[in-house]
């Protein structure tokens, strides 16, 4: 299994002599100083067993992180008239966790190399207690809106877990298994979004909308279990270190910001719609979804489809090329947004659901195809350096993969910020026009920009075109 959040060549060769930090020696049962996953004998004898154990607890911790990050997409369904918050105010409550999560992805990327994979997994899991305990304490009628905004913002720590988890698991597996391992890791984490929505649905259906704090209480023991499991069963690798200057250098590349723009359109759409879908249903079709539980019955379907279909984008990109798949995919997303806009104007719920399922489906496929473009871009640039300028092949390939790993961190952060833009677009649309139609038009225009940029940079016949992207 693979997902758009990963690539098999993620910084595999990034550890070149010029990037190496001063060697560190750690003594303790949880530190591994001899780790050779590319050695078949070592891997068969003990490497596979250790890596699998770390993968299991990494998936568990990241899954809980995604659930906490997206918890407010469920909690806003509990906020009835007694809370005095309108639709625009609820969209802001879901936008803030997305924003902080996007920002934290960058430092979380480097935390594993600084503190150790096991150590940071424990810390990042325990940090999830802060927003969860905050929800359990303050979420009741009479609480000020400012307090809710603050507590919602804290949930962003769950969004950072993905970056550190992927960086850590990448180091445990040999190149031939990275796609599978990172796919399991990312997929298990992403599914935390629909899972927390299903848990919220069960609470709404059983004990009612008057008990939103129960959702947080359900996750408290799971967070503690994730931290304890990581402490007991995971390991640190002494070889983990951060490549110096890679992110600074790759930030100077134009392709970095082009890919980040495209990833706003795919992952930004996925996470933004995941957070906002339930609210939009309640506002757009208030007569049908008069109670939160009715909206909750549909809220999880889109994120679940988007999570499960992610490998398809990578598979298609492997066969057809990432740029081609991304181009067609953005056209399909624009059409999906057109369907949603028409359905909104007609007040047709069935057509509306069809349009949103299209958006979730193609955002998942697009995540795979856009991320597959990253290593292809730097492989192509490496090939040009070797053939045209006589660059050393090993050094050029090492640099290309170091840049690919850094770009994954930047694109992941910028893409997550796209989720903020989605929620803010809905908020502004409802404030200005009392409907979401202006937001849908904005989405159509943005997807059109994405497919035009994809064609112009990566598909158009040009002397500067990179082959194989």
Image: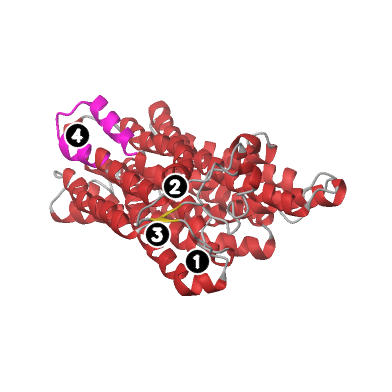
Find the distance from the CA under tag 4 to the CA under tag 3.
36 Å
Q: Earlier in the sequence, mark 3 or mark 1?
A: 1
Q: Nearer the viewer, residue 400 or 425?
A: 400
- Foreground disc of the pair 4, 1: 1
Q: Earlier in the sequence, mark 2 or mark 3?
A: 2
Q: Which residue is mark 3?
A: 188
> In the picture provided, is 276 more to the left or to the right than 406?
left
Q: Which mark is residue 81?
A: 4
Q: Is residue 361 magenta?
A: no
- Foreground disc of the pair 4, 2: 2
Q: Which mark is residue 1?
A: 1
- Residue 89 is drawn in which quadrant? top left
The image shows residue 126 at horizontal and vertical percentages of: 28, 44
Residue drawn 47% across the image and 35% down it: 421
The image shows residue 144, relative to residue 381, as above or below, that is above
Find the distance from the CA under tag 2 to the CA under tag 3.
15 Å
Find the distance from the CA under tag 4 to the CA under tag 2.
39 Å
- Residue 101 is drawn in which quadrant? top left
Q: Say which element carries label 4.
A: helix
Find the distance from the CA under tag 4 to the CA under tag 1.
44 Å
The image shows residue 78, relative to residue 150, as above or below, that is below
Crowding around mark 1 (Cα neighbors within 10 Å: few <14, some 14 to 19, many 20+) is some
Q: Which mark is residue 164?
A: 2
> In the picture provided, is 348 more to the left or to the right than 448?
left
Q: Nearer the viewer, residue 228 or 276?
A: 228
- Span of residues in magenta: 131-155
């Amino acid at each position: 299994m693979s997902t758009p959040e990963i690539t098999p060549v993620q910084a595999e060769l990034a550890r070149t002599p010029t990037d190496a930090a001063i060697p560190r020696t750690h003594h303790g049962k949880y530190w591994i100083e001899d780790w050779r996953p590319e050695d078949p004998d070592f891997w068969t004898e003990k490497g596979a067993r250790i890596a699998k154990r770390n993968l299991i607890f990494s998936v568990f911790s990241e899954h809980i992180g995604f659930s906490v990050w997206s918890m407010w997409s469920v909690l806003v369904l509990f906020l009835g008239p007694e809370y005095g918050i309108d639709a625009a105010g609820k969209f802001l409550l879901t936008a803030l966790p997305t924003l902080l999560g996007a920002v934290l992805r960058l430092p979380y990327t480097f935390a594993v190399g600084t503190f150790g994979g096991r150590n940071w997994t424990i810390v990042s899991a325990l940090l999830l207690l802060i927003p969860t305990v905050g929800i359990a304490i303050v979420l009741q009628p009479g609480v000020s809106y400012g307090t809710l905004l603050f507590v919602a913002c804290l949930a962003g720590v769950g969004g950072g877990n993905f970056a550190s988890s992927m960086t850590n698991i990448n180091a445990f597996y040999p190149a031939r298994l990275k796609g599978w391992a990172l796919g399991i890791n990312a997929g298990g984490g992403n599914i935390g979004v629909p899972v927390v929505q299903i848990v919220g649905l069960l609470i709404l259906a059983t004990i009612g909308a008057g008990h939103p704090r129960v959702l947080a209480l359900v996750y408290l023991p799971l967070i503690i279990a994730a931290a304890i499991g990581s402490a007991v069963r995971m390991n640190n690798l002494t070889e983990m270190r951060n490549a110096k200057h890679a992110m600074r250098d790759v930030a100077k590349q134009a392709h970095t910001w082009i890919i980040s723009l495209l990833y706003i359109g795919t992952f930004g759409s996925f996470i933004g719609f995941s957070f906002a879908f339930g609210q939009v249903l309640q506002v757009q079709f208030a007569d049908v979804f008069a109670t939160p539980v009715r909206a909750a019955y549909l809220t999880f379907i889109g994120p679940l489809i988007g999570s499960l279909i992610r490998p398809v984008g990578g598979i298609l990109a492997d066969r057809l090329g990432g740029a081609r798949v991304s181009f067609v995919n953005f056209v399909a997303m624009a059409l999906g947004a057109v369907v949603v806009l028409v359905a909104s104007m007609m007040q047709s719920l069935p057509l509306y659901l069809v349009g949103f399922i299209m958006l979730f489906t193609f955002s998942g496929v697009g995540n795979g195809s856009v991320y597959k473009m990253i290593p292809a871009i730097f492989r192509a640039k490496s090939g040009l350096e070797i053939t045209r300028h006589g660059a050393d092949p090993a050094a050029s390939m090492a640099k290309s993969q170091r840049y690919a790993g850094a770009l994954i961190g930047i694109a992941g952060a910028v893409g997550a910020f796209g989720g903020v833009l989605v929620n803010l677009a809905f908020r502004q649309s409802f404030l200005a026009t009392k409907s979401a139609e202006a937001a849908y038009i904005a989405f159509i225009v943005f997807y059109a920009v994405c497919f035009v940029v994809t064609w112009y940079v990566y598909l158009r016949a040009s002397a500067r075109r990179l082959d194989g992207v």
